[in-house]
Image (cartoon, grey):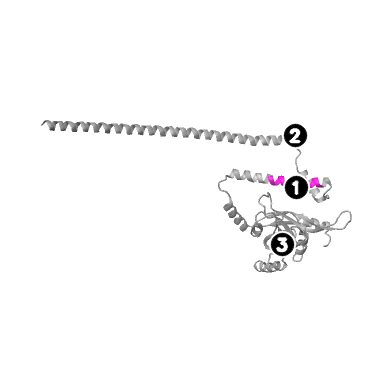
């Protein structure tokens, strides 16, 4: 492998890998059909799409037979002939889709990934490796993209092969968006309200942020302990992120935060008052309706009782008249 220069590293780091939902569904289906639930093994496949230089558009994929020894990571098997046969068939369907890289379900990097990445250079000059985490407990974007590079050390020692992380995104075309919406509509729980859905989404976002901050904290701790070398590019990105944080010691900023919070709490307080008044009004209306209904029922009962009494009186009068007629007949 030829050593990667600084310009090439910056170009690769600025290359965005766009993954379509069809690829994610295909990878999840490949993992579900191949491995049993709870298995720690991974599946490997080929990524198809277009490489425009600054963007790699991953639009399709297919799984390939892959086996590896869990005890010895250097022992693995990958079928080259299967890749060539499947790619020739895919090329007949859509000639614009080329092999742009490969994927596996990780969920982390493994020792054999560099060797597999070198193998894929037979099909594409700069293959991208995308790790798709299919585990349901993960939060955030389930993809991580990497390029294989030859790192040049500052001390002039021998170069070594490593992976360079590249930004990844999830994008969909109009037809894919419609399909994803229908799929979400089928699996979405209709019993939950919109507010509950929004709260769960916010909670998921906060959990994702917490996991990212945990990764940064562990990375900096390992650098401080001397177990991991310092990467200046990562340090520059962290410094840029820290520079964007507000200075909470500024009185004007704290006052603005307090004013904004008070305004939001005032809206919440007023809405709670309105909701309580409406609930009380509904309770009063319900009580009045129940009282009217009870009064009408009482009147109906009284009317029925008076009718029954009148009928009973008429019956007794008829009986007395019949008895009088019998007595007159007997006297005659």
User: Would you say residue 188 sits in the magenta stretch?
Assistant: no
Q: Which residue is disc 1 drawn over?
A: 215
Going from the N terminus, do you reach mark 2 or mark 1 first?
A: 1
Q: Is residue 157 left or right of residue 117?
A: right
Label 2 and label 1: CA atoms lie apart by 32 Å
Q: Which residue is disc 2 drawn over?
A: 251
Q: Which residues are magenta?
A: 207-222
Name the element at disc 1.
Answer: helix
Q: Which residue is disc 3 drawn over?
A: 67
Q: Which quadrant would residue 251 be assigned to in this image?
A: top right
Marker count (numbered): 3
Whole-percent x, y for residue 263 in the image:
65, 35
Name the element at disc 3.
Answer: strand
Instruction: Answer above or below: position of 331 versus 100.
Output: above
The residue lying toward the viewer, choosing from 67 and 289, is: 67
Whole-percent x, y for residue 328 in the image:
13, 31
Going from the N terminus, do you reach mark 3 or mark 2 first?
A: 3
Q: Residue at x 63, y 34 (%)?
A: 266
């Amino acid at each position: 492998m030829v050593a990667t220069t600084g310009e090439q590293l910056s170009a690769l780091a600025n290359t965005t890998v766009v993954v379509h939902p069809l690829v994610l569904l295909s990878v999840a289906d490949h993992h579900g059909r191949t491995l049993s639930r709870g298995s720690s093994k991974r599946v490997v496949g080929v990524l198809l799409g277009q490489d425009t230089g600054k963007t790699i558009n991953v639009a399709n994929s297919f799984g390939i037979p892959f086996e590896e020894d869990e005890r010895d990571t250097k022992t693995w098997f990958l079928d080259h002939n299967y890749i060539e046969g499947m790619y020739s068939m895919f090329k007949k369907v859509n000639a614009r889709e080329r092999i742009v890289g490969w994927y596996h379900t990780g969920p982390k990097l493994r020792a054999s990934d560099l060797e597999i990445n070198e193998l894929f250079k037979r099909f594409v000059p700069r293959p991208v490796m995308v790790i798709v985490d299919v585990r349901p407990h993960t939060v955030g974007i389930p993809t991580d993209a990497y390029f294989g590079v030859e790192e040049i050390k500052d001390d002039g020692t021998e170069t070594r092969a490593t992976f360079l992380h590249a930004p990844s995104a999830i994008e969909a075309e109009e037809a894919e968006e419609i399909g994803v919406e229908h799929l979400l509509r089928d699996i979405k729980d209709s019993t939950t309200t919109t507010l509950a859905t929004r709260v769960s989404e916010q909670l998921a976002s906060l959990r994702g942020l917490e996991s990212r901050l945990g990764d940064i904290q562990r990375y900096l701790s390992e650098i401080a302990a001397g177990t991991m070398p310092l990467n200046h590019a990562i340090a520059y990105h962290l410094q840029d992120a820290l520079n964007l944080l507000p200075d909470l010691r500024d009185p004007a900023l704290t006052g603005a935060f307090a004013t904004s919070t008070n305004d939001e709490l005032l809206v919440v307080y007023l809405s709670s008052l309105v909701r309580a008044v409406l609930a009380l009004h509904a309770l009063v209306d319900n009580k009045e309706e129940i009282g009217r209904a009870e009064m009408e029922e009482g009147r109906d009962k009284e009317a029925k009782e008076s009718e029954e009494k009148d009928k009973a009186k008429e019956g007794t009068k008829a009986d007395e008249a019949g008895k009088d007629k019998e007595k007159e007949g007997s006297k005659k």
